[in-house]
Image: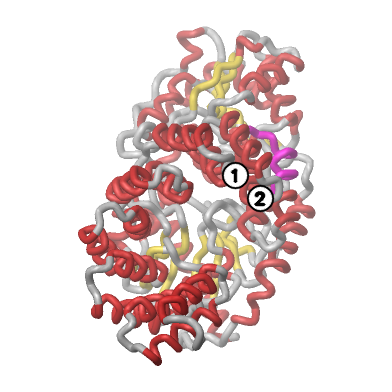
Amino acid sequence: MSYLTPQQALEYARARHAAGQLDEADAIYRQLLAIDPANVEAVHLLGVVTFSRGQFQPAIELMQRSIAMNPAVPRFHNNLGNALIDMGRFEEAIATLETALRLDPTLAAAHYNLGNALSRLRRWDEAVVAYRRALALHPDSSSAILNLGTALAATGQLAATVALYREALARLPPSAAIATNLGNALRDQSELDAAIEAYECSLRIEPNDPVAQGNLGNALKDQGEIAAALAAFRRALALKPDGAETHSNLVFTLTFDPDCPAAEIAAEQRVWDRRHAQPLRAEWRPHSNERSPERRLRIGYVSPDLWDHVVGRTLLPVFEAHDRERFEFTCYSGAAPDHITARFQARADRWRDLNQVSAAQLAGQVRADGIDILVDLALHTAHNSLLTFARKPAPVQVSWLGYPGSAGLEAIGYHLTDRFLEDGSSSGAFLLPGCWCCYARHPDSPAVNELPAATRGRITFGSFNNFCKMNPRVWDRWAGILDAVEGSRLVLLAKAGSHEAKTRDLLQARGIDPRRIEFLRYVPSAEERPQAEFLRRYHEIDIALDPFPYNGMTTTCDSLWMGVPVVALSGSTPLARASFSLLSNLGLPELAAPSPNEYVRIAVALAKDRARLAALRASLRSRMEASPLLDAESLARNVEAAWRTMWRRWCAS
């Protein structure tokens, strides 16, 4: 270095730093400071390179020291703010970045980093302002465009998100990330054809992107294109074999495939367990929980869906009915807060936010909280925490409510079920008396109306299930029902897309006039789709037809609550027996057929018996009110008794 001036050495170090040669840059910064400890630029840059090497606290101290030496440099405050974000110290980061912007309001990077800090705290409206200011100064920043879109979507401004991404794709060089995010926003708007087109655009730019492949699979699944969705998930996994979330999507989507035997689904679950969970067995440690069989137990509920979501609504009545003297409850939730979340928070002993928390960090928090029984409410659905459960942070681990059945993880010893879903012979099945779940009646439920066929003179069949449950075998049976019931119509609920026309074509090929098929538009936002308005749609339906092999659950209960009988096909897996369980607990097992031909026969016979239809419509709500389906108190006691039995087994083990 003797032949370089200090300034030349500093510039050389900067170049090494920018090239990723951190050790060499670090060494030069330290040599400069040995010669001149007051070199504030070297102090600050040493802090930056130290942070890049993962030495976080020493890095923060160096950056703070440089600011103390010269507080008038906005770049110093910006870099410190960025480091504080990475450390999760978001409030400190915001204050530091605001100082940078008071010194230099034109510093685009500080506006961008401020947006990032605000986003991490879910202060989305403020984040939108920060990102817009960053883009006003640096219009071509793809990172700011992507993050602004995320913030806009979080505030419900999906149309603005779509417009932002489309404008960026038209103006800037091709960006796979922006195209993928456009697809996500369009899917959130239920514009499935456009979402698929955006994902395909992303894959033309970056063919080996597993994220775009996986997102394409999800959009195809939403359209009921199960084979194509599975192919997309498999391509994504080939690109990124350790993609646990994508692999969960594959496992879950297999349950919708009518040609996939239960053994194949179970085999894929074992592959998931072997690939993603078993390597984490190295993190299993003995549990120090007090082995007292009758003491007050600490229960942990883990779910991304403790909001106005089917899981949140289903669990809430049971959660509010739990015995707080015998059990203590901690909720681990990633939900964006709403009125349902507030009710959970009001009754929880502890509330832990899942956002920005890794699976390993969550496992550590569960251990620190001393949880005795950890309950997974997601299984292989979106945003699950299976990688936390794979680390076995609690001595007893249970799956429940995400959907009937098991997630297939060795680390989760039990799943709650009932005698109608399965016989208890499957691994970990714990049979509850009565029903495995209950229905959360809506306080503003519209009254049950008279039988529509009584005034219209024709039968209207309907299914408001997610379209991913539809398949050729369903269309075959539904076409047979429509053909046998003269003048009947079929009302379906669907997101916008070409699958509507395809459905009409499929039914027309089976001899059904497409004019007999009506589609109602699915509305994704709960604010735009009040539950009472959704339930009022059942005023148009005489008989609900349940899909298979993945039955309805909340949809089945909604139908019954509105006086609409449900005809179901009972299969061999818990998912294919969900409606059979609900109908059996209601005292109407005869509406669940043991075979496809019997399914058609029951629906046709019911359609031709107007007197029975009218009687069912008039009595179903009161029948539900007197059944286990609305008895949250009993279900809470049954679940608690199951926990106690599991706990005693562990204490004795």
Q: Which mark is residue 176?
A: 1
**Residue 125 visible in the displayed image:** yes
The reply, left or right, for residue 421 in relation to residue 165 is right
- Magenta residues (range): 223-233
Q: Could you tell whether 214 is left or right of 448 in the image?
A: right
Q: How many marks?
A: 2
Q: Amino acid at mark 2?
A: Asp
Q: Is residue 226 magenta?
A: yes
Give the image location of residue 467, x and y in percent: 60, 33
Q: Are marks 1 and 2 in contact (CB under 8 Å)?
A: yes
Q: Amino acid at mark 1?
A: Ala
Q: Residue at x 55, y 10 (%)?
A: 458
- Residue 200 x %, y %: 65, 37
Quarter of the image where one finds residue 63: bottom left
Q: Is residue 644 visible?
A: no
Q: Is residue 69 above or below residue 105?
A: below
| Residue sitting at x 61%, y 22% | 500
SS at badge 1: helix
Classify the position of the C terminus by image quarter: bottom right
Q: Which residue is mark 2?
A: 209
Q: Name the quadrant containing residue 610.
A: top right
Q: Is residue 100 above or below residue 152?
A: below
Residue 374, numbered circle: none
Query: Is 340 positioned to the left or the right of 303 in the image?
Result: left
Residue at 45 percent of width and 44 percent of height: 140
In terms of secondary structure, what is the magenta stretch mainly? helix
Q: Residue furthest left?
A: 102
From mark 1 to mark 2, how far is it between C-alphas?
A: 8 Å
In the rendered image of this protein, does residue 384 appear above or below residue 33?
above
